[in-house]
């Protein structure tokens, strides 16, 4: 059975030594000193290793069951959920006004990484509920907030997001679910929603569905979509639960992974719904939560890579097979541990250098969200908006790739259920698809985010990279191992952006044909920046005699691998982009 | 449910228009005219689509069951197996002296691609049996051949390969299974073998196990390994079946995919075994079949990509979502089919350009095997020996990637069981692992094959590319779209080889740290060559007014995508290789 150990030292390094969170001028960050975060992270790590991780294969094997409209989660999920709830883990970064602990989203993300590594399917129950609560918090009326948020934040109720229908996933303009206005100000919701994660389950007393639907007579397409609260059980004035609403789970999806999470077909049959915000403004309400939700999925991607890597590493140190070509390393054993072999090390370093870089990028994104929400910093909001599709798309593509590489480290054992690696691969796979497929992320990046604020935000990113390089290139070692490759990657990214500018106006397909490669190019450049920031921090600490020197030297070496062996991908992506639309667009549809 | 249509026109194009098989001076090839192969391929395509493909999800869902030592295959497998046997499909390219039809391995591969695309788990039963029969054919005594081959080739008996044990996979020198010599010339085999595909099942009357074991007192390591025939049921002098031998299936492995194939733990408890070939020469016997087996796995890799692509394409033409940014394409529908979107086309072309290139490479490899076996051509043997790790490693890595991309085309539907794409991903995953992990393939390529014949073989490959380019570069269109990128890729490959030569002697890790990237670099260069050969053939046919012009133009366009969008990967692989051993080898084991 696989195991999980929370990488507390790595997380602390990013929080305190790289992002220097406790020194940042963001309300609430002053409380995040090293002792406090150590206590929180170690406690979260403990529950992750001891409670959540052992349930991960259980959830995979048992899956969820539906009988007479009742969904049962796998053995142990309810007890673990209650333990999480009672420990206050579900309310960590929620608004204290509604019972939350008010911690920064950054710390919530750090803890979230652990929960996801330990048991992604389980963590989705609380993760989606958190998203639904955020939507109500941002767009609900005062009464709606008072009615739903305390229970949702505390965890005795959960929430869902209902967007997809059989005929529409990406293209929400095609939604058919109807919301008929009633005289009492409520609406009657009718329609079918599919792929609703945690749409029905036995973990909470009530489920608060957020549903996108169309009010008859409204505008066509996405401009006519409204957002509704549809509780599973009606809520009485005193907060107690009333009648069952007309919403039922009609089926569970059989799927490749995340078996422990119930993916439901939901039937709304004249269910009572309450409008959230204004009529026809539902898409806007969804979009304001999108950054947070998508960064959360990016985190899921690398978090699956992280736990897969941990188990691959343990195997590589333990498995004896073959001898080091440069000399026997384990003379008392029948063979050397496979970690001596260069190709096994290459594989492990590919995994390790990705997940550690990805963590830094995801946490940077989370800190920008705090800066935007807590300090009202518009530049931070613009920057995180630009980075969001990169964090979602790149970190999930590479997180899945990392899980596949980790599985490969185990050879045949990686293909068996027993070792658990194959579950990480299957679970990680969904992160490339949901919350907008990675293709959609790349369209969002190239079609929307690149041009936002007249291109000022992306220029600010380039400027940030440039001044960072300038500030540190006096250090010859940093320059050769980090800053020169970073400069080259950033140059490739700028060249790609230039190609889109010069060709996209007269032929949008010239830009759109390169969007996916651009997302990856950006991802590599961003991880190159994060690794350079980590190397600068580690170098300085070593010079100042601070921190754990072995840990810091390992960081510098791991980053060197990333810069030397992963960053060269930028040239490939640029070449693909610069080949333009022709290779992609010329073939007739009939000739495929 | 997914479907499969045999790509007969594509296969014929490679066989006849690119490889020009019927014109090749190889015994048996003269019979392979276009009418004959059309008849065979269409018939094989029919059974693939109608019989094997519908059983693929059945096998995945039901898996195999073990009860009291008896393994039951999924519903319908036995009937399909009998149909295949009676149709003569199992004996296609086997020796007529033992009941085979004596067709070339090339044609066997073409038919095999279809069977694998339709149902990989099912096809493994006959595929492994074919390999075992080949081993007996190459190394068995006349009596062994007469006893086992007719039944195995006809398909009423099957065969297995027993290599792996719990403590040894790659490193077969660690084998513990013992073979005690008996006075009657037989051996008593005792030990445990794991991951034995088709080790026990209900499809055939007898199972002929080929087992690697050590005769006590023999040399240590791989030099002391011998190969034995261990039949499940003893065979009487008259060919009838006698007593059960002391070999039983002790368990079935639960695994990520290929559920329809029984992966067995085999217990040998003093089972009677017959030596194949000489004592202690078992490894040699295994190795002589390796090329064929590994090319077969490479074929599995792209064949899974092919069927996944077919289903992704059908979805992309059918699914309506969003509008073409350059103008509405489907005004009568609520949205355009997603194939209009550049990023969906990019994804589909990535899949298509890989599988079609891969087919050409695999068939070229198969034709070299025929040339080596049937004509005794030593150069062909050396060349296919060089290409084998590339075909196995590159085509399976990219075949899996292709299945993942195809799954992505379907968005959320790709993650559900219902659409079947996720099965192709899970099934394809094993091809990167078995018959030697792809890491091992890369070691074989760089550590063994590159230097074979003093490097003459790889030089001959470069020379072949060079003279091909020279021969055709008068055509400006071919030059720009194909030959220039091919030249660049070949140059990158040579530069990588040069790097290994200059650095590998004083530090083997400098070469071994780059072996995996070299395998991919070689794969891209080889597919670049195959696409160029296909483009040359299609261009000539168009000029000569031969063939189906729409088909030929689509080939040229698809290849252009490969050259423009996939070949640029060679620069990335070269950069990684040239970064040398340091980034891979410096980090201490304890610091991982």
Image: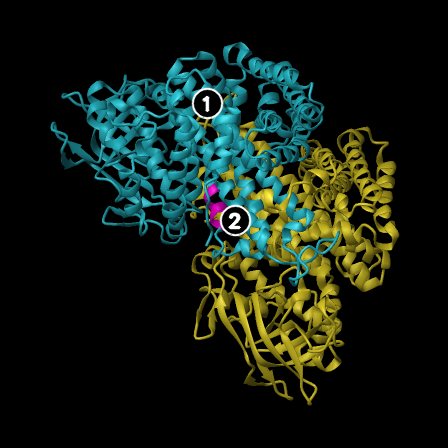
Chain colours: A cyan, B yellow
Residue at the outermost front position: A545
Task: Say which quarter of the image contains residue B412.
Answer: top left
Circle 2 is placed at which residue position? Answer: A311
In this rendered view, identify the residue nearer to me: B170 or B23.
B170
B475 vs A414: above or below: above
In this rendered view, identify the residue nearer to me: B265 or A449.
B265
SS label for mark 1 = helix
- The chain that hosts pointer 1 is A
Report the residue at 58% width, 74% height from top. Answer: B191
Query: Going from the N terminus, do you reach mark 2 or mark 1 first?
Result: 1
The image position of residue B224, as x and y in percent, is 73, 72
- The label on residue A501 is none
The image position of residue A114, as x and y in percent, is 43, 38
Range of the magenta residues? Answer: A421-428
The image position of residue A43, as x and y in percent, is 37, 39
- The chain that hosts pointer 2 is A
* Foreground tag (2 vs 1): 1
Whether residue A410 is visible here, answered yes or no, is: no
- The label on residue A21 is 1
B481 vs B420: above or below: above
- Kindly indicate whether the residues beneath marks 2 and 1 are on one polypeptide chain: yes
Task: Say which quarter of the image contains residue B571.
Answer: top right
Gap in angstroms between the C-alphas marked 2 and 1: 30 Å
Task: Say which quarter of the image contains residue A34.
Answer: top left
Report the residue at 12% width, 30% height from top. Answer: A236
């Amino acid at each position: 059975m696989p195991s999980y150990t929370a990488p507390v030292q790595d997380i602390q390094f990013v929080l305190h030594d790289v992002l220097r969170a406790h020194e940042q001028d963001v309300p609430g960050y002053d409380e995040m000193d090293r002792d406090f975060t150590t206590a929180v992270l170690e406690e979260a790590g403990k529950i992750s290793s001891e409670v959540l991780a052992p349930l991960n294969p259980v959830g995979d094997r048992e899956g969820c069951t539906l009988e007479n409209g009742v969904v049962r989660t796998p053995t142990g999920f309810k007890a673990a959920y209650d333990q999480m709830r009672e420990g206050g883990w579900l309310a960590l970064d929620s608004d204290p006004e509604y019972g939350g602990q008010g911690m920064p989203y950054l710390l919530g993300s750090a803890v979230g990484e652990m929960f996801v590594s330990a048991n992604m399917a389980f963590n989705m129950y609380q993760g989606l509920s958190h998203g639904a609560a955020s939507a109500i918090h941002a767009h609900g009326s005062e009464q709606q907030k008072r009615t739903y948020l305390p229970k949702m934040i505390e965890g005795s109720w959960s929430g869902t997001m209902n967007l997809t229908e059989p005929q529409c996933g990406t293209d929400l303009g095609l939604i058919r679910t109807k919301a008929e206005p009633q005289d009492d100000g409520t609406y009657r919701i009718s329609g079918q929603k599919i792929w609703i994660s945690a749409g029905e389950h036995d973990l909470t007393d009530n489920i608060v569905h957020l549903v996108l639907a169309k009010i008859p007579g409204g505008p066509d397409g996405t401009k006519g979509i409204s957002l509704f609260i549809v509780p599973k059980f009606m809520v009485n004035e005193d907060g107690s639960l009333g009648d069952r609403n007309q919403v039922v789970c009609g089926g569970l999806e059989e799927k490749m992974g995340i078996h422990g999470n119930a993916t439901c077909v939901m039937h709304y049959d004249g269910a009572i719904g309450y409008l959230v915000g204004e009529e026809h403004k539902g898409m806007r309400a969804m979009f304001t939560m999108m950054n947070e939700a998508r960064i959360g999925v990016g985190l899921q991607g690398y978090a699956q890579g992280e736990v897969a890597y941990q188990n691959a590493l343990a195997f590589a140190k333990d498995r004896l097979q073959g001898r080091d070509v440069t000399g026997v390393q384990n003379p008392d054993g029948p063979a050397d541990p496979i970690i001596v072999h260069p190709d096994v090390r290459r594989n492990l370093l590919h995994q390790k250098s990705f997940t550690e870089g990805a963590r830094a990028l995801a946490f940077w994104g989370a800190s920008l969200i705090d800066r935007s929400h807590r300090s009202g910093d518009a530049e931070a909001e613009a920057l995180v908006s630009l980075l969001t599709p990169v964090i979602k798309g790149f970190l999930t593509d590479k997180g899945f790739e990392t899980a596949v590489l980790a599985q490969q480290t185990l050879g045949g054992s990686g293909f068996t259920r027993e070792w658990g690696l194959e579950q990480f691969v299957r679970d990680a796979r969904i992160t490339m698809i949901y919350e907008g497929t990675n293709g959609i992320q790349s369209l969002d990046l190239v079609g929307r985010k690149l041009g936002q604020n007249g291109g000022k935000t992306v220029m600010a990113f380039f400027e940030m990279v440039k001044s960072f390089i300038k500030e540190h290139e006096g250090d010859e070692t940093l320059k050769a191992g980090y800053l020169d490759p970073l400069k080259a990657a950033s140059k490739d990214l700028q060249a790609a952006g230039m190609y889109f500018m010069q060709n996209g106006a007269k032929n949008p397909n010239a830009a759109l044909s390169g969007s996916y490669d651009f997302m990856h190019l950006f991802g590599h450049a961003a991880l190159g920046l994060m690794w350079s920031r980590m190397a600068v921090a580690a170098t300085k600490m070593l010079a100042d005699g601070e921190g754990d020197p072995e840990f810091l030297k390992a960081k510098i070496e791991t980053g060197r691998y990333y810069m030397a062996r992963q960053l060269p991908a930028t040239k490939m992506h640029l070449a693909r982009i610069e080949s333009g639309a022709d290779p992609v667009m010329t073939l007739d549809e009939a000739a495929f």
